[in-house]
Amino acid sequence: EQIKKGNYDHFMQKEIHEQPHSLTTTMRGRLRDNDVVLGGLKDHLKTIRHSRRIIFIGCGTSYNAALAARPFMEELSGIPVTLELASDLLDRQGAMYREDTAVFVSQSGETADTLLALEYALENGALCVGITNTVGSTLARKTHCGVHINAGCEIGVASTKAYTSQIVVMVMMALAIGADKISTQSKREAIINALPDLPNKVSEVLKLDNEMKDLAESLIEAQSLFVFGRGYNYATALEGALKVKEVALMHSEGMLAGEMKHGPLALVDETLPIIVIATHDACFSKQQSVIQQLHARNGRLIVMCSKGDASSVCPSGSCRVIEVPQVADCLQPVINIVPLQLLAYHLTVLRGYDVDQPRNLAKSVTTQ
Ligand code: AGP
């Protein structure tokens, strides 16, 4: 086992640091001549383009990856995109039509809820697309078509590199679906040009490792942690909080910053640590005002911002700032999750919990 971990103490740590490589393999051979080539989808792109909606279905981190994908999938495809937690779709027996494209996202390809939702979608006649890391998995076999994320084997129960590779696959899928849409061509080209440099940007953000360890030291005794995000980074807030709760066993909630005034604000005081994701995108000024409101209530603020923005997100200098490299808005969730993965990892080690086998959890949830 130690051989497989290489120079790392834990699989989760190794998998976090492997992301520049896993993202490279996810994109390998798929970006060509200013275009995206996804072999597993090419015969179905026409059907997808004519769907009445795209429904993403998954559980846990895979659901969060789909949530990160929704804004750009909608923008680049022009097709309405909805999201379903697999268990909730089954509980409700939610509406599903022949004209729908149902996209199932699962690292293992064996999650029971996701597979049951797949059966349900097949029965209802939807086109079923699989996005998985596991070649030969039930998901890969039972869907009509799909894309492997090629992130390499993920062993830590906490999903890290699969999350970032899932997002990149969904970016490529959105680019492929939107290839014939004139109005988004310049944005499409900008993303295609930015993708090859993404692994370098991830290497850059991984240099925050010691800073995140230091932040974890300051949070060891905290009872709770809030993470506020919105837009492209609403998913980052949910996923960061999920990582902290599942491995560091600390209560943590990811929230949509736009909902702050509708309840969560009541919990804010000088003891509760709050991470606000405020990297530069269309939601930046709204996040600045969230920071001001939290500041006015003496919130214990940790702000994630784009490099060089520290003084504009925290003019008083009273909050802790995590500066990350800026990339195209739809790729920013891939960068922004990395410091939160590192934080969850260090918090777990410092609190003395099992990093790779958190209590009560299994890597693949094969029962309902
Ligand atoms: C992620 O850290 C969790 N272990 C969990 O939420 C997981 O993502 C979920 O069970 C779905 O698994 P899958 O991607 O293999 O379907």
Image (cartoon, rainbow, N blue to C red):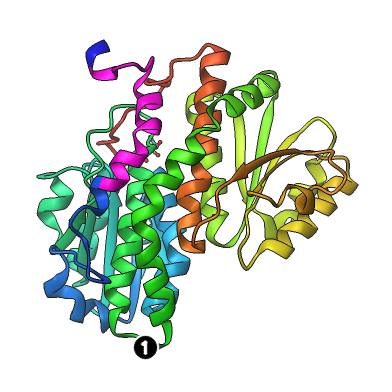
Across and down, in percent, residue 146 comes to 18, 60
Q: Is residue 323 left or right of residue 272?
A: left
Across and down, in percent, residue 29 comes to 17, 57
Q: Is residue 254 left or right of residue 17?
A: right
As for residue 80 lying within the magenta part, the answer is no
Residue drawn at the location 21% of the way across and 52% of the way down: 28
Q: Quadrant of the N terminus?
A: top left
Q: Quadrant of residue 275?
A: top right
| Residue 242 visible (yes or no) | no
Across and down, in percent, residue 206 comes to 48, 35
Q: Quadrant of residue 27?
A: bottom left
Most common secondary structure along the magenta stretch? helix
Across and down, in percent, residue 56 comes to 35, 62
Q: Is residue 168 left or right of residue 40?
A: right
Compared to 67, does 47 lie above or below? below
Residue drawn at the location 50% of the way across and 57% of the way down: 327
Q: Quadrant of the C terminus?
A: top left
Instruction: Name the residue nearer the viewer: 141 or 112.
Output: 141
Q: How many marks?
A: 1
As for residue 10 lying within the magenta part, the answer is yes
Residue drawn at the location 73% of the way across and 54% of the way down: 260
Residue drawn at the location 52% of the way across and 20% of the way down: 348
Tell whether circle 1 marks a residue whose Cβ is less than 8 angstroms from ligand 1: no
In magenta, the rendered stretch is: 4-24
Check disc 1 and give the amino acid type: Ile
Q: Quadrant of ligand 1?
A: top left
How many residues crowd mark 1 within 10 Å: few (<14), some (14–19), many (20+)?
few
Q: Circle 1 sits in a helix, a strand or a loop, which is it?
A: helix
Residue to which mark 1 is pinned: 182
